[in-house]
Image: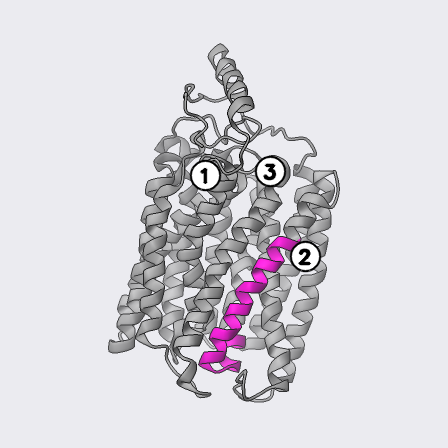
Amino acid sequence: MGSSGNVESGTQNTEKIKSSSIFRYNSPFVQVILIGLVCFCCPGMFNAVSGMGGGGQVNATASNNSLTALYTFFAIFGILGGGIYNILGPHLTLFAGCSTYVLYSGSFLYYNHHQHQAFAIIAGGILGIGAGLLWAAQGAIMTSYPPVNRKGTYISIFWSIFNLGGVIGGLIPFILNYHSGSGAATVNDGTYIGFMAFMALGAVLSLSILPASKVVRDDGTRCTNILYSNVVTEFIEILKLFYNWKMLIMVPAAWSSNFFYTYQFNHVNKTQFTLRTRGFNNAFYWGAQMLGSVGIGYVMDFSFKSRRKRGLVGICVVAFLGSSIWVGAIANQIQRNGLEILDFKDSSSRYAGPFLLYFSFGLLDAMFQSMVYWVIGALANDSEILSRYAGFYKGIQSAGAAVAWQIDNHSVSPLNQLIVNVVLTTVSYPLMLILVLRAVKDNNGSEEEPVKQVAPSIDNDFIH
């Protein structure tokens, strides 16, 4: 115990001399930007593919089956991912995860020529494993690296960079398929090749992320003091999540947070707009996510001095705006004019309403998920604990998505899918309020963070 105190004291003294810049390579700010760039290239481009509806194909069957395989494995490895991250660290975990995105886009390039969905389904399952690893690592980094009182700000910085990938990813099919006209069409090979190039770059960038033990905040505190974990410890800690009331009360929010993608992508963007307009819409959908994350990040970090009060207000803001958006979605679904396909150039006034709705869906997604991540980050400060929490969240989220894509495959009506989405998100809000009231404290301490083995003092803790 004595050596632990010496390590912390030495770290604090070093900080006073050397931690003046947030642009240090081992600062939380730089590391969150780097993980944002990694997600810009990999899941950001994946979002652009899935956001077109049907993976950019006329027939959505192959994409739906592939996404079902993806989210089934994602559900498993999302939950296991936090433990794997604690054992392997960020380099191996992130690189392995990012590499699977390239294969997924390549499978749709193959499908463009051969129309065999087996490769796409297998690639989807492999991506589910990789995505589980990547998002568990990302969740740990985004919720544990930032200073306690600025987690909402750092989440919004990450979310903005990440979704810039979706914006650019939306512009790629828009530009490359601009001359496809107003009829239904499949995206061309160049679109998938462009996505693959970005995803490969993301895999390389993932090697730049530092482990939590080497990241030092401006106040001199480390993101974690643990040197390593092991399989037995992680297995036991992951099992404990399934009877942790904080995780159980979060299940409806986690389940619903990707469940609505199926309706938004396949029954608004895919069925109501032409191919080039879908790419155009996607650029604004993911751009709206940048605005939504910044707005809710400000509310949850700066609106009140009390952290608990900020959390409660943030949830209420998301509940009000989210419910308003779903009311608009119900009106659009009921009033939809048959099977008319809208084009941003040809449909003018008829295009404006559905476009605004789809844009608002982007706002809702960012606000909802940023809200949940903020609450997760407020439950603890330690990277190990938060990696497991984030992994559990992503695992339940992915299980919901897997079910949603298969519901769509079984021809459940769009209106029924929409109603389920409204119910799920509405139920989530009071439960999140209870979680904040009972588990989020106004101080920075956490009752779940016992004294652990600490890393030895390292002379070059601060890397300029």
Residue 285 within the segment the image draws in magenta: yes
The answer to whether residue 22 is above or below residue 19 is below
Q: Amino acid at mark 3?
A: Leu
Which residue is painted at 44% across and 87% down in the image? 181
- Tell me if residue 412 can be seen: no
Residue 211 within the segment the image draws in magenta: no
In the picture, measured across the screen, residue 319 lies left or right of residue 447, that is right
C-alpha span from label 1 to label 3:
18 Å
Which secondary structure, mark 3?
Answer: helix
Q: Amino acid at mark 1?
A: Leu
Q: Earlier in the sequence, mark 2 or mark 1?
A: 1
Q: Nearer the viewer, residue 9 or 53?
A: 9
Name the residue tied to disc 1.
Answer: 239
Name the residue tied to disc 2.
Answer: 318
The answer to whether residue 71 is above or below residue 352 is above
Q: Amino acid at mark 2?
A: Val
- Where are the magenta residues, as a range? 267-295
